[in-house]
Image: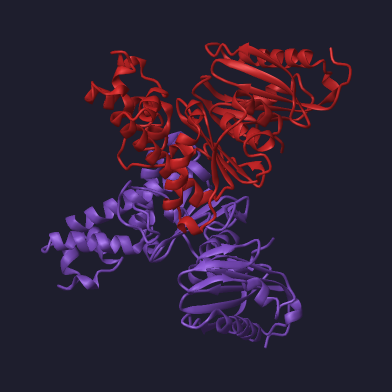
Chain colours: A red, B purple
Amino acid sequence: MKQVTEKFRFGIDIGGTGIKAGVVSTENQILGQAYVPTGAERSWQEVVPDIVHAAEEALKDAGEFMENCISVGIGCPGTIDAQTGTVVYSNNLNWQNVPLAQELHRTFTQPVFISNDANCAALGEVCAGAAKGFQNVFMLTLGTGVGSGIIINGRIFEGGGPGGAEFGHTLLVEDGELCTCGRRGCLESYASATALIRQAKRTAKQAPNSLLCTLCKGDLSRMDGRIPFQAARQGDEAGQRVIREYIKHLAAGIANAVNIFRPQAVLLSGGISKEGTYLTDPLTALVAEEVFGKKNSFLPQIRAAELGNTAGMIGAANLSQ
Amino acid sequence: MKQVTEKFRFGIDIGGTGIKAGVVSTENQILGQAYVPTGAERSWQEVVPDIVHAAEEALKDAGEFMENCISVGIGCPGTIDAQTGTVVYSNNLNWQNVPLAQELHRTFTQPVFISNDANCAALGEVCAGAAKGFQNVFMLTLGTGVGSGIIINGRIFEGGGPGGAEFGHTLLVEDGELCTCGRRGCLESYASATALIRQAKRTAKQAPNSLLCTLCKGDLSRMDGRIPFQAARQGDEAGQRVIREYIKHLAAGIANAVNIFRPQAVLLSGGISKEGTYLTDPLTALVAEEVFGKKNSFLPQIRAAELGNTAGMIGAANLSQ
């Protein structure tokens, strides 16, 4: 057990699979952490004690004491009402109108703050990652879906009410691909890893002799988000076509965000962001051509996020009123 | 001259054609006003004295005294840097990097605030018009272009830097109609009055026997934003097709805004907004079908703006740090 204790904040990242709890110092160092499975098949009444348990384990791991805790921050997938601390709807957790802050107040006397997990990840990157020192940041998490985290003047932008800040569900292609939200043509339905894989499969099917196809070893169900990039990097025409289209769509979505938010930085996270400059260089060029005012306007840096799976914890710990 | 004077704010609305100056009470009554032509063909050094002159005339009209002035607010078309009080670029005025606040401080000792004219119009409607009492409002001005004014927590959202909050330049149709900004498929290129007229002309050309065409009296250059609505209301198939498409595009743009901002109200201004519920009823239905969370989510009221050409003055008067 560490000898010196200090003031800290809990940052808890609830996912569909696991709950990560962190004891985060005021300098954004993770002093201790713990992981428990979410067990999302259970009712929320059963999950909440495990959130508390994860926090207690993280406290032990840090050798800290509850009386040094300043606040408890929670990042949660889905539509969150940050004002009331309610999870309005979470598909991943199968939760609806869960008064999470109120429930946690049975255990914690400290202020409890809740926000969407993508928001927390963006705030984490601003506090301690790729956007450190920036006040206005737009982050897209390119995963199963497309999550957006919008930071304005150093704080999470929640929108005027629950269901705002859902940038993944803005239009790119009228009457385009069906999105998980029921609308057609959303950014999510073109820029998620799921969308990339779908398009790569389609292209591979039409080009059975391509590297894109052969990298799947004759089984297109093996297609993942890395293979089209791998094929494209090796000069495969089919792979390059898939990546060119993917980057074009992502650039269009980022240009929309720039025209609305004019952030100092655009961050990309999720597995696809690991492609680094192979992704961000063409994005940077395309976005500069598309935005209002073009190259002469105020252009953000486009870069990969840095914190990986600790971003959510650190961001959650930094939630405030 | 009125006998009783009171504290007031100047609200000045600079347009491509005219400068409107208002003496606005703290209760948002216009106590006096004046209009001078902009003379935008002149240099900004020649225009600025006329802005001051318009304010002085409005002061006389109100029977007010300069010592009662709290602040000077300016609404200006184009890209504004609200922080430095600079007009970064204004196409309508042919201005570039004009230090307007600094220039006006030669005359006014009071704080001078500057924002985009569409932002000011939205703030005006929040302070004294169709969105009175609302804190989160999204307004589209459907005119030659599509201007957007975004109010978050009762204040104008300027974006993280100049060139933000340009919602008219977000994508609706990939590789679609060429927009004035140089991009293809922006909301502006489908939802402006200019776009409506363009589409109505195209449709009328293909349907020479339609009411849409005959209302132009054989001269399609007479087409305006009212004629397609007039034809549609009278059951003309060509007119209805034009309006249906127009409303579909506008609804898609509003749904995008709702998914980002979740405002309490969406306001429409400009000539087209005078179509009232013929426009807003189908928009309301379409937006509810398209937004994230659909009908069960938090849906804004969609309504026409109320203040008309005084919105800009009243909004400008309410600008603050």
Q: Residue A184, can we see it?
A: no
Q: Is residue A22 above or below residue B203?
A: above
User: Which of the 4 image quadrants contains residue B8?
Assistant: bottom right
Quarter occupied by the N terminus of chain A: top right
How many marks can you see? 0
Depth check: give the residue in front, B100 or B253.
B100
User: Does residue A311 appear to the left or right of B195 in the view shown?
Assistant: right
User: Does residue B72 appear to the left or right of B199 in the view shown?
Assistant: right
Quarter occupied by the C terminus of chain A: top right
User: Does residue A267 appear to the left or right of B268 in the view shown?
Assistant: right
Q: Is residue A56 above or below residue A110?
A: above
Outermost residue toward the front in this view: A234
Depth check: give the residue in front, A110 or B285.
A110
Outermost residue toward the right in this view: A3
Q: Residue A157, can we see it?
A: yes
Q: What's the residue at 34%, 57% (across, down)?
A: B189
Outermost residue toward the left in this view: B209
User: Does residue A259 appear to the left or right of A99 in the view shown?
Assistant: left
**Looking at the picture, how far across and down is residue B109, in whole percent?**
75, 76
**Looking at the picture, how far across and down is residue A93, in whole percent?**
53, 19
**Looking at the picture, how far across and down is residue A194, in whole percent?**
40, 25
Depth check: give the residue in front, B236 or B238.
B238
**Looking at the picture, how far across and down is residue A106, in whole percent?**
74, 20
User: Which of the 4 image quadrants contains residue A171?
Assistant: top left
Q: What's the residue at 82%, 15% (across, down)?
A: A63
